[in-house]
């Protein structure tokens, strides 16, 4: 039972490059989330999927897109990376939208 | 807009000391409050969840209290150990809404 897994663990991009962060959970949770964590800013919600087939914007969605591929997987895409997107990205899942969230180990992204 | 503040930002204590971490929030109409632990380079681990109708929750050496009317929660750690060294974050949720996180308190327990 792996919980929430994220790939890759680390990534360096040049400005303008694109990439997709992958997230998968094996707990049969309905809701999944993408957060970013920046020094002095705490964790901020980028996008979430309350249930399979739905996605909604969070607090800081600009510059990102998401796909809820199936119940297990929720990906985050940066179409044209910018230095302001340098951050640590966390995926999380919960049984329902108001339930206790479980977090993945994070992806540390640097955009040069 | 809900804002969550954690004081102090960093705390260093000798092993064995009892300590209190503070969390305050601006909107008292919360559904629940959670405390998390984050180890360096790792994700967050949920520690304690307090529903809005509850006053406190306990798990081992940890005790979290909630005073909704004053917009405050405290996390009490008894008999601290070096293994407790981590960043502790609190987060609040309104009904049907997203979690709002504080910036965390970085705790160092010195042997």
Image (tube, coloured by chain):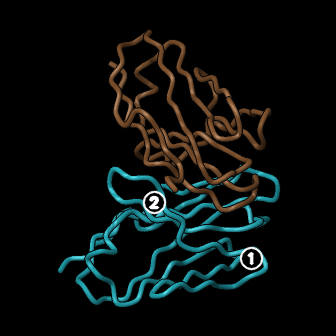
Chain colours: A brown, B cyan
Determine the CA span between mark 1 and mark 2: 22 Å
Which residue is the extreme one toward the right? B96
Image coordinates of residue B97 in percent, x first then y, are: 77, 51
Q: Which quadrant of the structure image shows residue A94?
A: bottom right
- Which residue occupies 76% across, 43% down? A50
Which residue is the extreme one toward the front? A1
Label 2 neighbourhood size at 10 Å, few (<14), some (14-19), many (20+)? Answer: many
In the picture, the quarter occupied by the C terminus of chain B is bottom left
Q: Please, what secondary structure does the residue beneath circle 2 have?
A: loop
Q: Which one is nearer the viewer's eye here, A84 or A10?
A: A10
Q: Chain of mark 1?
A: B
Q: Is residue B23 visible?
A: yes
Image coordinates of residue A109 in percent, x first then y, are: 38, 30
- Do circles 1 and 2 both sit on a common chain? yes
- Report the residue marked by disc 2: B104
| Vertical relation: A46 (above or below) B69 | above
Q: Which one is nearer the viewer's eye here, A107 or A80?
A: A107
- Report the residue marked by disc 1: B69
Q: Which mark is residue A56?
A: none
Image coordinates of residue A18 in percent, x first then y, are: 47, 14
- Which residue occupies 69% across, 85% down? B55
Image coordinates of residue B96 in percent, x first then y, are: 82, 53
| Vertical relation: A11 (above or below) B74 | above
């Amino acid at each position: 039972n792996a919980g929430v897994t994220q790939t890759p663990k680390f990534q360096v991009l040049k400005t303008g490059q694109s990439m997709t962060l992958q997230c998968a959970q094996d707990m049969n949770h309905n809701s999944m989330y993408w957060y970013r964590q920046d020094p002095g800013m705490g964790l901020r919600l980028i996008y979430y999927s309350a249930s399979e087939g739905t996605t909604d914007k969070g607090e800081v969605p600009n510059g990102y897109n998401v796909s809820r591929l199936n119940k297990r997987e929720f990906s985050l895409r940066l179409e044209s990376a910018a230095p302001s997107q340098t951050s640590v990205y966390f995926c999380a899942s919960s049984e329902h939208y108001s339930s206790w969230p479980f977090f993945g180990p994070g992806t540390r992204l640097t955009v040069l | 807009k809900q804002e969550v503040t954690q004081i102090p930002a960093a705390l260093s204590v000798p092993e064995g000391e009892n300590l209190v971490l503070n969390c305050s929030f601006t909107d008292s109409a919360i559904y629940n409050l959670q405390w998390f632990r984050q180890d360096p380079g790792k994700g967050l681990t949920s520690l304690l969840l307090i529903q809005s109708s509850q006053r406190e929750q306990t798990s081992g050496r940890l005790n979290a209290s909630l005073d909704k009317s004053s917009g405050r929660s405290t996390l009490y750690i008894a008999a601290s150990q070096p293994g407790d060294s981590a960043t502790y974050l609190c987060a609040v949720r309104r009904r049907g809404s997203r979690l709002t996180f504080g910036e965390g308190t970085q705790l160092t327990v010195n042997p």
